[in-house]
Image (spheres, rainbow, N blue to C red):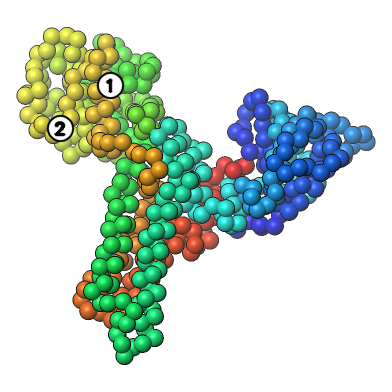
Amino acid sequence: MFAPDDTIVAVATPSGRGGLGVVRLSGPHATSLAKDLLDHSAPLLARHATVSRIVDTGGPSVEAVDRVVATFFPRPGSYTGDDVVEISAHGSPVLLERIVALACARGARLAEPGEFTLRAYLNGRLDLVQAEAVADLVDAVTPLQARIAFDQLEGTVTQAIGALDTELFDLVARLEASLDFPDEGYHFVEPGMVAQGIASIREGVAALLAGASRGRLIREGCQVVILGKPNVGKSSVFNALVGSSRAIVTPVAGTTRDLVSDVVDLEGLAVRLVDSAGIRATSDAVEAEGVDRARQAVSVASAVVVVLDRSAPWEVEDQQVLQETANSRRVVAMNKMDEPARWSREVLALGRDVAVVAVSAMTGEGLEALRGRLRTVLVGGGEVYRDTPTVANQRHIGLLERAGASLGDAERAARGGATEEFVLADLQLARTALEELTGKRTPDEVVNHIFERFCIGK
């Protein structure tokens, strides 16, 4: 763990040049350090922007470094819960690093990755779920990812888990109290109400987990492979979905020999689209390697877009691609709808539950329908509503599953007439899982691992 009583400093804005850059100081000596850096004799006023200059007094003469705006956020109402001073300077990396160096020369320590948010967590400004949401919000690449992360930062998941933990705590307290009266048995809660109460809590956990796979796909993004035999227009479909000519398109079969990928925003989903080599038997060693890589990509993909050329005769290779993807989540794209059709959907011999869309990569017709069907295949239909708890983090999912399993064991024990001790043992395991999720009882190594993935300055 980091030393929480040091005064730390770091550049809080992304690396690179910009109009503005922010250097953040946090800790017990933040204001005195800022005073040493600034050409400003009066104390900084709380939450008041102060125009000043950064000066270097370490040389034979005082040297002005930059004109800045300094803002003081006093504890405990700052981001970290400690005194914080944020210095907005011009966004030159050279200037920002010099300000950091000057602060370190006066006693500050360069912050570790995520240390500002870690202090917010340690000082009770955020729980662990909200702290993780900070990193998710910074990493968001689609509006939907940002919205889910912000809702989590606002406490939607925390409140839902807190409500379940409150119910669980009340039930545990009643059972523990009854242990003080062994001759009375279930003195503080009727036996029939125990199983009923546990079942209610378990249903709440199950409700949070119901949308977890969808939430995880939104948070983490997913991979979709575009597959088909050569010359059906896979690369053209790929380019049309990406919105640029990323993949080479020629009339020559076997043009694509390696995986070409790009990330697109698919109605809020961050989807890595992968264009692949045409699936066919070939004696060309390079093309054969491309075909093998295409099949490997399919094995780890969240979904597959099977591209078929409906303007060409139906061939055995088309059927082979359908058979190879039978166990994958998929959308079948009947390409080249701008040309006369040589076969109809009935040739596919697929059930009506399989998503089949007619498209033209050339004209763009049907592409919106393809995007919509692909999104439905990935995360189902419906909207993700604002201010509703969406569990999207694998750590949260695992702990909720653990809590649910313990609650199930406790419910079975209660219905089977087990004594309070046996029921309580499982309920305490469920509480431990919920408290580890929010950070009330999380091992230090887990906390360290979470904050290590943050960027420096956050």
151, above or below 360, in the image: below
Q: From the viewer's side, name the closer residue of 413 and 246.
A: 413
Percent position of residue 269, x then y: 36, 33
Left or right, 321 with respect to 410, comes to: left
Name, please, the residue furthest toward the right. 60
Q: Residues within 10 Å of mark 1 (few under 14, many from 20)?
A: few
Left or right, 82 with respect to 420, comes to: right
Rendered residue at 70%/33% (across/down): 88
Percent position of residue 412, x then y: 23, 71
Rendered residue at 78%/29% (across/down): 67
Label ID, residue 368: 1
Report, in whole angstroms, how far the alpha carbon at label 1 lies from the one at label 2: 17 Å
Q: From the viewer's side, name the closer residue of 326 and 87.
A: 87
Amino acid type of the residue that numbered disc 2 sits on in the rendered structure: Val
402, above or below 274, in the image: below
- Quarter-wise, where is residue 406 in the image? bottom left
